[in-house]
Amino acid sequence: MKTEVRPRLMSVRAAAEELGLSVWTLRSWAYSGRIGSHKVGNRLMIAPSEIDKIVRDSERPRLVAK
């Protein structure tokens, strides 16, 4: 079984690809404080835990058939 190893920080481009969002959406969310980010040199980086948080927070309840 192959386990996936995620980096401690991801580029905005990699995070955007994983979420299916645009780079500019993630940059906007980071600069407005909607998600946490890190400035490393001149690069904006996103922690994988923030990606997980975005997915968790956007989850909608499953509909139950009546």
Image (cartoon, rainbow, N blue to C red):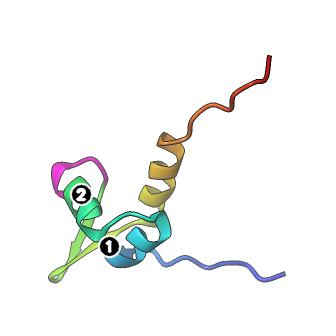
* SS category of the residue bearing label 2: helix
In x, y percent, where is residue 54? 44, 50
Count of numbered badges drawn on the protein = 2
The alpha-carbon separation of the residues under discs 2 and 1 comes to: 10 Å
Q: Residue lying at the far top in this picture: please name it.
A: 66
> From the image, which quarter does the C terminus lie in?
top right
At a point 44% along the width and 73% down the height, the residue shown is: 17
Q: Residue lying at the far front in this picture: please name it.
A: 66
In x, y percent, where is residue 58? 48, 42
At a point 42% along the width and 57% down the height, the residue shown is: 50
Mark 2 or 1 closer to N-term? 1
Question: For this rendering, which residue is in front, 43 or 20?
Answer: 20
Q: Residues within 10 Å of mark 1 (few under 14, many from 20)?
A: many
- The answer to which image quadrant residue 59 occupies is top right
- Left or right, 23 with respect to 10, comes to left
Query: Which residue, given by chain and number where applicable, does mark 2 sit on?
Result: 30
In magenta stretch: residue 48:
no
Say above or below: 40 vs 16. Answer: below
> From the image, which quarter does the N terminus lie in?
bottom right
- Left or right, 15 with respect to 38, comes to right
In x, y percent, where is residue 42? 15, 82
Residue type at the position of mark 2: Ala
- Left or right, 38 with respect to 18, comes to left
Magenta extent: 30-35
At a point 39% along the width and 69% down the height, the residue shown is: 16
Image marks 2 and 1: residues in contact by CB distance under 8 Å: yes
Question: For this rendering, which residue is in front, 44 or 58?
Answer: 58
Q: Which mark is residue 12?
A: 1
